[in-house]
Amino acid sequence: MVQKIIASFIIVSHFLWANNILQEAIDNAKPGSRLELPAGVYHGNIIIDKPLIIDGKDQKAVIEGDGNGTVVIIKSSRVTLKNLTIRHSGEEHERVDAGVALQKVEQCSIENCKIIDCLFGIDMAQVTHTEINGNYIESKPFALGLRGDGVRLWYSNDNHLSHNHLYKSRDFVVWYSHGNLIEKNRGEYGRYSLHFMYTGKNIVKDNVYKHNSVGIFFMYSQDTVATGNLIENSLGTTGLGIGMKDASNFVLKDNTIIYCARGLFIDRSPYEPDTENIIEGNRIIYNSEGIHFHSLSLHNRFVGNIFKGNIENVINDSYNARVTENVFDGNYWDDYEGFDRNGDGIGDGPYNYYAYADKVWLLNPNVKFFYGSPVISILNFLAKLAPFSEPVLLLSDKHPKMYEGRV
């Protein structure tokens, strides 16, 4: 069944606003109906409590909130919103004022919508088997920490989120949520472009995250695969590409991390006994730090990665991190100084990376401004040539690759 809100309703947009014609149409529609909205502005703060399809056709139908609360609340399964512009939510964090809120539903779809001037974009609480695809989401023009999250999953499992563009929102957060596929999204000028807490068995692939404080951070999570993602320009004092804290049984594969303050940040990962994290085939290039180890982190396996153009390939900031108990094998290191006499593409000797006591001063944030300068290069050379104390071995790669490509 298709029910249309006819064009005569939108001749005077104030009429639509005053009478909340959209809520009336929803209330009067039979379950399973399709409401096609002509171009115009419709009163928001609506509640959908039955299966419906609402189609705005090319985003020219605008659902506008009154600046209080959430613009669209979905309380029924099998609801579809598509091709709409949704705007002007409230500003209260404690109420999670959002463009769209889905509450305890399944098999819904939010598709090709433009959600702007909303504190939170799409808020999903106890939502399953739902499609969030092709949406543009932008928060209110607040300071970074005061914006809401572009997408927020809370106890929401087995959902598919793809081709969404988050711009100047705060975070894309996945909390207590499992089995979600997050792919081909884009995040720019936010805080955490993707942040997991207490999650498992999610797949994160082919996303692009640029100019955020943090690319992807996995916390207290396990059994997740991140592959084919591009993280670029995560800068500032908290800037990092991919972080893992208390994260177990992860696979990070074929990701590119470039121009970040820290490429990989590893903190007490893996956490669960008898597990390991696989870091394979990633391009960790042109960062201030390639890998930053923080706290005890054992049994990570680094295989076939490319470390190129980083000012420091590996940093260990903890006394008892025991970095040498991680496995490094077959990686490319641009500062490897060995030979390949038999031409098999593998260095004849191991790549050994040392920490020099002379370089501790380089961790001073004020001095980091001069990283990459000729003066710092000379000081690094002198530290290796005549160290004041015995250097500490951080890692050894027994089969370093001579070239960036696959051997």
Image: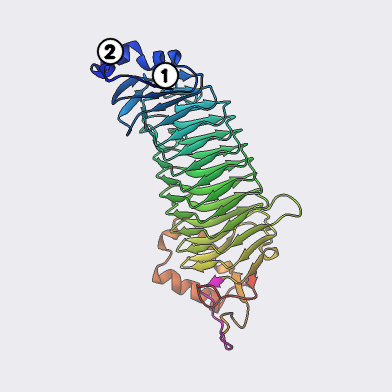
What is the count of numbered marks?
2
Tell me the quadrant of the picture where the N terminus can be found: top left
Residue at left 28%, top 13%? 15
Tell me if I can see residue 51 in this picture.
yes
**Tag 1's secondary structure?**
loop
250 sits left or right of 141 in the view? right
Position above or below: 54 against 250: above
Query: Which residue is situated farthest in the front direction here?
Result: 1
Tell me if I can see residue 236 in this picture.
no
Q: Which colour scheme is used?
A: rainbow
- Point out residue 324 in the picture as x, y percentages from the top left corner: 68, 66
**Tag 2's secondary structure?**
helix
Crowd tier of the residue under label 2, counting other residues whose Cα lies within 10 Å: few below 14, some 14–19, many 20 or above: some
Tell me the quadrant of the picture where the C terminus can be found: bottom right
Residue marked by disc 1: 45
303 sits left or right of 5 in the view? right
Q: Is the magenta stretch mostly helix, strand or loop?
A: loop
Residue marked by disc 2: 15
Q: Is residue 214 magenta?
A: no
Tell me, for residue 27, which label it has, or none. Answer: none
Magenta span of residues = 332-343
Query: Which residue is situated farthest in the left direction here?
Result: 11
- Point out residue 81 in the picture as x, y percentages from the top left corner: 43, 29
Position above or below: 104 against 327: above
Query: Which residue is situated farthest in the top direction here?
Result: 19
Q: Which amino acid does label 2 sit on?
A: Phe
Q: Choose between 55 and 386: the one closer to the eye.
A: 55
Q: Choose between 394 and 78: the one closer to the eye.
A: 78
Residue at left 41%, top 59%? 369
- Point out residue 82 in the picture as x, y percentages from the top left corner: 41, 32
- Point out residue 153 in the picture as x, y percentages from the top left corner: 55, 35
Mark pair 2, 1: CA separation: 16 Å
